[in-house]
């Protein structure tokens, strides 16, 4: 049994817990100075299957070369 605040309680057991996605870091251009900044865009129905519904808030952690995004 998991603890009451366990992250395991957030996910549907029907959805695989690990899926690999390969993306390309693109860029966005900031006006007025036209500086390019790195950007990563995530989109697709698969997001909702993993708990990322439209309008949901997310928690982002960056550590040791990894970005972890979790629904709140």
Image: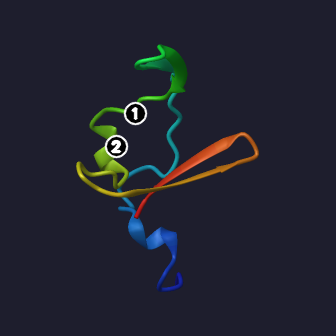
Q: Please give the residue where the numbered disc 1 appears in the rendered image.
A: 42
Which residue in the protein does label 2 denote? Answer: 47
Say which label, 2 or 1, has the lower sequence index: 1
Q: Residue furthest left?
A: 54
Residue at the extreme right: 64
Asked if 28 appears above or below 40 in the picture, the reply is: above
60 vs 57, left or right, is: right
Q: Position of 38 compared to 65: left or right?
A: left
Residue 24 visible in the shown view: no
Give x and y (percent) for residue 18.
Answer: 52, 46
Q: Is residue 62 left or right of residue 59?
A: right
What's the CA distance linking mark 2 and mark 1?
Answer: 8 Å
- Assign a secondary structure to mark 2: helix
Residue 62 in percent (x, y) is at 64, 49
Residue at the spot 40% in from the left edge and 20% down from the top edge: 31
Question: Which percent across, then down, holds residue 23?
Answer: 51, 23
Q: Residue at x 53, y 17 (%)?
A: 36
The residue depicted at 29 percent of the width and 56 percent of the height is 56
Q: Secondary structure at mark 1?
A: loop
Q: What is the total number of numbered labels drawn onto the structure image?
A: 2
Q: Is residue 58 visible?
A: yes
Query: For the residues carrying marks 2 and 1, which lies nearer the camera in this image?
Result: 1
Asked if marks 2 and 1 touch (Cβ < 8 Å), the reply is yes
x, y (%) of residue 40? 48, 29
């Amino acid at each position: 049994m998991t603890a009451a605040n366990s992250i395991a309680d957030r996910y549907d057991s029907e959805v695989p817990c690990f899926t690999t996605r390969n993306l390309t870091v693109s860029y966005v251009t900031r006006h007025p100075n036209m500086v390019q900044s790195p950007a990563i865009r995530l989109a697709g129905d698969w997001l909702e299957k993993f708990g990322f519904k439209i309008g949901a808030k997310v928690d982002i952690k960056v550590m040791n070369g990894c970005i972890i995004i979790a629904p709140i």
